[in-house]
Image (tube, helix red, strand yellow):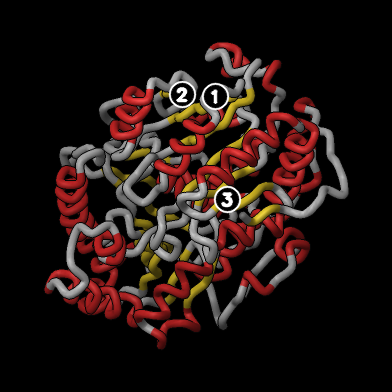
Amino acid sequence: MTVSRNISSKKIYDRSLIRFLPWVRQQETATDSSTKLSVVTQFFPPDYAATGQLIEELVKHLGRQGMSIDVFTGQPGYAYQSDAAAKEEILESGVRVRRSNITKFGSKRLRGALLGGLLFSFRAIAHIVANYRKYNLLLVTTAPPFLPVIGYLLNFFFNVPYICLVYDIHPDISVELGMIRRDHPIVKIWTWLNKQVWRNSKEIIVLSSNMKDRIVAHCPEVENKIAVIHSWADPQKIYPIEKKENWFAQKHNLVEKFTVLYSGNMGRCHDIDTMFKAALALKDEPIQFVCIGKGAKQDTLKAKIKQHGLTNFVFLPYQDKKDLTYSLTASDLALVSVSEGMEGLVAPSKVYGYLASGRPIAAICPESTYLNKMLEEGNCGAGFRNGDAQGLAQYILELSQDQEKAKALGESARNYLENNFSPAAIANQYNAVLQKKEAVDFESFGSDFIKKTSFYL
């Protein structure tokens, strides 16, 4: 178990003052107006997918900095409320969003997700080929995982420079999940394609140091053009609220009991079993587990709960983005998990919303995962090895019996988010990479530098 240091200071938040905190006035970087950026990503609001919501916030900030941006995306298909979104719209920051007409396929089943991703990729190729003269830089994400190949092909045929934004690494994930053999021809071809994509990209952006290490292990020659830029959460939109003042907590009877929250996707890359076993060990305690969202492992979890007759779980659907503050702060402790072997392949974005909500965090993950370093550096929670359900259960019980400690850890989490992972600070880091003249190592900068400095290279 990795446990954070003792709390040295406390901070009190007033909802009425939330929009006037000093970090709100952080200056944004001026952008070279000659940059015309095309962003290609399958997921974008009103889809609830976290990757899409983060891209929306990013392009809005870059648009306000003066960059001309065109987003090509798909119709909602991951987690959504409405069946369709406008084919074309202009965001308030001047960003143009265009959506494919391709029929959406849900992602709960792998086959549907792959088919939807392939169809979107073909449509994206047609869109970019028809419009490539309108921009001079392409940002391609790994949503779907083979999308960066489009950047490589356009660079090869039309000399369009591209930057890869890596959310996860395939086919490595499929290999780790046992879905395909490491020596399978498809794996070898896909890995070869990845190397071509990385070698020919202008830059590569990854979400964690573990992810950078994984890419460098495959392709050492690209190390100097990989930038580690974390995800983020907006502290103006997500902020601490006491449970007793929270309508969401009241509505779902979460006020009285100590509440452990798992918010977001319960996917194939997440360790849900350790959480279940911890809940099983705590079945007779006044502690409840709340799972908000869906995912491939949710049905299995529900079956185990029914089999063991547990009554300490509550399941709720994905919540509207406008209600995120209330759903996240309806808890006393937040859980994030990464399965064994996945530490360099995925980077859960939910942790940044947890930090903004002012709640302590328990991470279930391999010991080498960057999450452990974050929790120690931020003094805001503890990490537990996969399978250490007893250690996790003991930590949950400890915090439930010492809520002053839980509150102090949560305040430290909020401070950590404000000082390191605000949208303006992260957008400035993206801006630096998009217009980079020389290598930038953001992880070597102190938090004060990242918070106060406008990056322009």
- For label 1, the crowd category at 10 Å Cα-Cα, with few meaning under 14, some 14 to 19 and many 20 or more, is many
438 vs 42, left or right, is right
Residue 244 shown left or right of residue 180 in the figure:
right
For the residue labelled by badge 1, is the local secondary structure a helix, a strand or a loop? Answer: strand
Dot 3: what SS? loop
Query: Which residue is labeled 3 in the image?
Result: 232
Q: Residue at x 43, y 63 (%)?
A: 36
Q: Would you place residue 9 above or below residue 284 in this image?
A: below
**Mark 2: which secondary structure?**
strand
Question: CB atoms at circles 2 and 1 under 8 Å apart?
Answer: yes
Which residue is denoted by mark 1 in the rendering?
288
Tell me which amino acid carries mark 3: Trp
Real-space Cα distance between discs 2 and 3? Answer: 28 Å
Bin the neighbour count of mark 3 within 10 Å (Cα to Cα): few under 14, some 14-19, many 20 and up.
many
Q: Is residue 311 above or below residue 424?
A: above
Query: Are there few (<14), some (14-19), or many (20+) residues within 10 Å of tag 2?
Result: some
> Mark 2 or mark 1, which has the lower sequence index?
1
- In the image, 210 versus 323, the foreground residue is 210
Q: Earlier in the sequence, mark 3 or mark 1?
A: 3
Three-letter amino acid code at disc 1? Gln
**Quarter occupied by the N terminus:** bottom right
At 32% across and 25% down in the image, what residue appears? 307
Identify the residue at image location x=35%, y=80%. Answer: 218
Residue at which label 2 appears:
313
At a point 61% along the width and 75% down the height, the residue shown is 441
Whether residue 22 is visible to the viewer of this picture, yes or no, is yes
Residue 260: x percent and y percent? Answer: 57, 31
Determine whether, in the image, residue 178 is placed left or right of residue 137. Answer: left
Per the rendering, the mark at residue 255 is: none
Task: State the CA–CA distance, disc 2 to disc 1.
Answer: 6 Å
